[in-house]
Amino acid sequence: MRLDWPQLVGRPEIDIRKTLEPLEPLQISLHDESGQKDDIIKYIKFVVYSKREMRSWREEDKQRVIEVLSESGRYVSCNYGHNASHWRLTPTNRFRWVVCQFDGLSRSFPANIWRVLADLPESFDKTYEETLLGIDKEKREYAQRLFQCLSVSIHPCRVEELAEFLRFSSMRQRLFPLMKICG
């Protein structure tokens, strides 16, 4: 596997590109590395036993979560790039998929854990679709504004910057009718 800059940062940061492009490519295998699989399993166990919402679960439910996420995360599909037929499965993608699953699991009633585990999304596309559909209706407009801001940002945004963007955006929306009247 060739390690390219998109796999390191997720998008082409100009300063990173300038630094990495002149370097010779380095071949590093990230697939089937037992240490990385062990790290994912350790992370799953850590979250299951330390997250407040999950600490009160029955031991058999915790073990089932560990078992299912450890195995399911190995087979998740990930669309990489703009070509839908170009699929890559890396330990990083597996880890990210597992992290995403904890959101839904932590909001589940203990009685529903096994059903939620049986219905886990098989791909990032499905995971993101479920996540986006889970945004409360009254918050969707704000989420859309944040996504627009993130998509055109030239650097990764801090939470404070996104909050300022929402404040400015809301203020502009309230003042726009006045600006039309006042000319």
Image: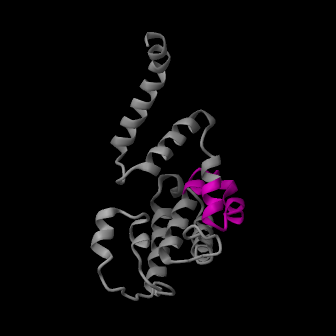
Q: Which range is magenta?
A: 103-129
Taking depth in this image into account, of 3 and 58 the one nearest to the observer is 3
Task: Residue at 63%, 62% (x, y): give it.
Answer: 125
Q: Is residue 57 left or right of residue 20?
A: right
Task: Residue at 48%, 25% (x, y): give it.
Answer: 173
Coordinates of residue 85 in the picture (x, y in percent): 65, 75
Q: Quadrant of residue 127?
A: bottom right
Q: Is residue 62 left or right of residue 159?
A: right
Coordinates of residue 122 in the picture (x, y in percent): 67, 68
Coordinates of residue 29 in the picture (x, y in percent): 45, 88
Q: Is residue 119 magenta?
A: yes
Coordinates of residue 21 in the picture (x, y in percent): 33, 76
Image: 104 above or below 176: below
Which residue is at the far top?
182
Taking depth in this image into account, of 164 and 183 the one nearest to the observer is 183
Q: How is the image coloured?
A: one colour
Image: 102 above or below 41: above
Principal secondary structure, stretch drawn in magenta: helix
Quarter containing the C terminus:
top left
Q: Is residue 88 magenta?
A: no
Task: Residue at 68%, 59% (x, y): give it.
Answer: 116
Task: Residue at 32%, 63% (x, y): give it.
Answer: 14
Taking depth in this image into account, of 132 and 116 the one nearest to the observer is 132
